[in-house]
């Protein structure tokens, strides 16, 4: 993309927006950044923009935005917002930061989307490739923005990208060499007019530009996954925990197999994985497909899987105190994630639930709550909804703060209980992001005497 002297407006002055602004400035564009948040909330971003000599505004989206040839949108800005509607009406081209950064990418892109498991899978891809002697980065919705690293990527290097549906909404030519949809369950319906098909179609666009040189990996066990791709040249592999496959990765008799080009081989065993739980085995099968397609030796793959340290805020062990285990699953921002979390433990659970609701259907975890949960502490703007649904099933108390939940859970819990923060909601009603929420939880737990 030749952007020299192009007028580019960037909506959103947090991680991806700042990354895009710096990248655009680097390649000679005239850049303007706009964010409706106050200066107090954007101090670190403002310092970066000022040091880079990039024009910006805070607290509003003014008409200056429309004096542009191109608009780059951050994931947090809804498609039905006034600024997007006006930009489209004026005929200004709108793309995502993902699309923008990819146009400068010389390395190999591994695109990872899905409702759940993206962060773990993206991290495991980067860990495996680096551990096996290749150079790989993890970016996108995890760690660094794609724009922050893309200009440094070399041809023989890799970038594993955690990709949200919002980023895929505004792609045109985004072209990963490897792509996967881990699973598709209802999420973010508040952003998709409460229409699951709109959300699903957004996910499916990850492979729309792939061709016969590329690979797409789908979830054979997920009825919503595109296991039949019509009129596509892309090489299509699948993964399954239930069925033996002729083309892809599968689990059988506690062993992980890879099957491709009429050859089947045993790569490793469940006991070789540092990650536990069925959902993590599924994530591992995806990474195994990618590693095998890159012709990495089985012993190196096995070593990578056994040495992976896991992901912060995803079923993260925090502390054991008086025989009670505290688990931080702050990244569980939808009901499906909580379903996996509740099924990961055999012990009795005290569950901390709530936050900014995204159209949650709590009936999805009704049985797991009845069977495993002894008490729920409800927090955030969705606390009443949580209380109203679960109060007749298990004891529920509404609390104002996460710290209060931890203190009360300590009083209620007995030996061998799990205190689990797995909110099923976004964090923006009380916290900056899910990382902030997780850190507050961990601090509260570690402050217990």
Image: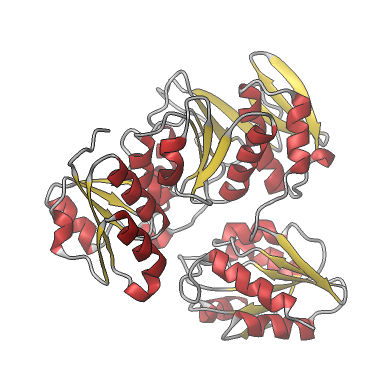
Foreground pick, 248 / 363:
248
The answer to which image quadrant residue 299 occupies is top right
Query: How many numbered markers are drawn?
Result: 0
The answer to which image quadrant residue 66 occupies is bottom left
**Vertical side of 267 occupied by 171: above or below:** below
**Vertical side of 429 occupied by 244: above or below:** above
The answer to which image quadrant residue 86 occupies is bottom left
Q: Is residue 302 left or right of residue 118?
A: right
Residue 161: percent from left, percent from top = 50, 42
Foreground pick, 201 / 157:
157
Foreground pick, 151 / 272:
151
Residue 62: percent from left, percent from top = 17, 65
The residue located at (40%, 33%) in the rendering is 105
Residue 307: percent from left, percent from top = 76, 42
Q: Is residue 362 left or right of residue 201?
A: right
Check the image and tell me how it is coloured: secondary structure
Can you name the residue that lies furthest to the top here? Answer: 262
The residue located at (38%, 50%) in the rendering is 19
> Quarter holding the N terminus?
top left
**Vertical side of 444 occupied by 182: above or below:** above
The residue located at (46%, 71%) in the rendering is 428
Q: Is residue 87 left or right of residue 17?
A: left
> Quarter holding the C terminus?
bottom right
Residue 134: percent from left, percent from top = 62, 29
Q: Is residue 394 left or right of residue 255?
A: left
Q: Is residue 375 visible?
A: no
Q: Is residue 258 visible?
A: yes
């Amino acid at each position: 993309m030749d952007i020299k002297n192009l007028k580019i407006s960037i909506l959103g002055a947090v991680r991806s927006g700042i990354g895009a602004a710096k990248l655009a400035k680097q390649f000679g564009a005239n850049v303007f950044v706009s964010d409706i948040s106050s200066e107090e909330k954007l101090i670190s971003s403002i310092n970066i923009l000022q040091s880079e000599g990039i024009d910006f505004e805070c607290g509003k989206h003014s008409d200056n935005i429309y004096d542009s040839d191109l608009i780059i949108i951050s994931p947090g800005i809804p498609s039905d917002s006034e600024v997007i509607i006006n930009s489209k009406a004026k005929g200004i081209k709108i793309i995502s930061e993902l699309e923008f950064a990819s146009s400068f990418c010389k390395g190999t892109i591994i695109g990872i989307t899905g409702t759940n498991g993206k962060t773990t899978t993206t991290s495991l891809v980067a860990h495996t490739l680096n551990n096996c002697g290749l150079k790989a980065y993890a970016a996108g919705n995890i760690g660094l923005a794609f724009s922050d690293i893309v200009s440094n990527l070399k041809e023989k290097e890799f970038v594993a990208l955690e990709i949200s549906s919002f980023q895929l909404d505004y792609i045109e030519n985004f072209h990963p060499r490897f792509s996967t949809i881990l699973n598709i369950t209802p999420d973010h319906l508040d952003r998709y007019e409460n229409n699951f098909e709109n959300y699903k179609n957004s996910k499916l666009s990850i492979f729309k530009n792939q061709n016969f040189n590329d690979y797409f990996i789908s979830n054979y066990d997920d009825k919503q996954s595109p296991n039949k791709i019509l009129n596509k040249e892309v090489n299509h592999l699948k993964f399954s925990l239930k069925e033996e496959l002729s083309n892809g990765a599968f689990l059988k008799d506690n062993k992980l197999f890879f099957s491709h080009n009429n050859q089947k081989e045993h790569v490793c065993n469940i006991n070789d994985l540092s990650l536990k739980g069925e959902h993590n085995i599924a994530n591992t099968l995806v990474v195994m497909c990618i590693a095998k397609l890159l012709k990495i030796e089985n012993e190196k793959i096995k070593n990578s899987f056994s040495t992976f340290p896991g992901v912060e805020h995803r079923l993260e062990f925090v502390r054991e105190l008086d025989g009670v285990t505290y688990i931080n699953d702050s990244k569980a921002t939808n009901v499906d994630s909580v379903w996996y979390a509740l099924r990961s433990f055999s012990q009795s659970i005290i569950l901390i639930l709530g936050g900014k609701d995204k159209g949650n259907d709590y009936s999805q975890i009704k049985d797991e709550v009845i069977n495993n949960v002894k008490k729920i502490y409800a927090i955030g703007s969705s606390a009443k909804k949580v209380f109203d649904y679960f109060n007749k099933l298990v004891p529920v108390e509404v609390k104002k703060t996460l710290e209060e939940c931890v203190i009360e859970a300590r009083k209620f819990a007995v030996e061998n209980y799990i205190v689990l923060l797995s909110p099923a909601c976004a964090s923006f009603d009380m916290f900056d992001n899910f990382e902030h929420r997780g850190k507050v939880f961990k601090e509260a737990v570690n402050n217990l005497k």
